[in-house]
Amino acid sequence: MTDEPVETLSLKQFQALAKQGDTDVVPVPKARTVALAQTANLVQIGPSGPGLGRRFALDLKPVTLGRDAQCSLAIADGSVSRLHAHIEPRDDGGYRLSDLNSRNGTFVNGTRLSRSDLKDGDYVQLGECVFRFLAGGNVEAGYHDEIHRLTLLDPLTGVHNRRSMAVFLERELDRAARYVRPFAVILIDADHFKLVNDRHGHLGGDEVLKGLAARLRNLARAEDLVARYGGEEFAIALPETDLAAAVVAADRFRRAVAVSPFDFNGTGIDLTVSIGVAAFEPGAPSGDLLQTADGRLYEAKRGGRNRVVPAPDSNLSASTETPAPIGVTREIEL
């Protein structure tokens, strides 16, 4: 835009006009007020790998996210499009996220969107890469809280991770031995999960894992700890639980998974799980509960899948190894 030429007046002309009382009040157009964009970061929280925990500062300039090296925020991941999404500051100081017709879509808090105004704490997913949007008065504290959370939780499913489970087991087994209390462990593995990935892609597989974790977490007690132990395998630690009660709980988890399909973009995906159970009994050596439960899990797989197999115990009926029909409730015989 070019400036229009303006008439200039000398000091004498101003004085003359003032004496004549012929001065006009000339309105000055108000400048457009734009709020400064609030301090904001994107923190990568998934998948596991060298990018985990990376922090990207957002400022007043638009940012392009994608696989292309020329992007403002380059993401070296095959699930991300070359030009995947765009973030720009808004006039009110916030930020707006827009999808750039990406192949695998842009998701905010699990919902696929073409455009969204971001809020502090939002989860942003591009392909298989997940970010946390942090904004507001104390971004630095939020960043460190998020990094601490990453040390405890699995970024995909939101349940505890393997490291967190190991710490919990060490503490609870020590307590069980010291105070002579029961304690049990359940290992759960999704049956034929490779077929889910083959048929629906890794994004479909991720949605199933998130749904599976949610069902397990919703059924677990407040004192239990649910963890993603690796791949499609989950572990549940049950304090104050003997083997018989753990088997009942395990079959409840099994039925909750099999009773209804998991949704992925309107498609139902059926899934079953195989489960191994082991328990620490007061007065008996603790041994390696996870190794024992893993052996029972292998037996469940070998025995036909979609079943619960506990560690040997004379108080349990062998019928626990026979699966109930999918969607049909059958109590374990004790």
Image (cartoon, rainbow, N blue to C red):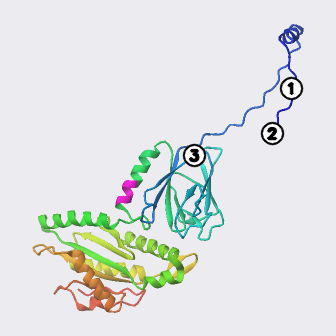
The crowding category of the residue bearing disc 2, from other C-alpha atoms within 10 Å (few below 14, some 14 to 19, many at least 20), is few
Q: Which residue is mark 2?
A: 1
**Front-lying residue, 34 or 273:** 34
Residue 324: percent from left, percent from top: 36, 89
Q: Secondary structure at mark 1?
A: loop
Magenta span includes 180: no
Residue 291 drawn at (x, y percent): 23, 78
Q: Quadrant of residue 68?
A: bottom right
Q: Main secondary structure of the magenta part?
A: helix
| Farthest residue, direction top | 19
Which quadrant holds the N terminus?
A: top right
Instruction: Give the magenta part as a residue range.
Output: 147-151
Say which residue label 1 marks. 6
Disc 1 versus disc 3: distance between alpha carbons?
A: 37 Å
Three-letter amino acid code of the residue under disc 1: Val
Q: Secondary structure at mark 3?
A: loop
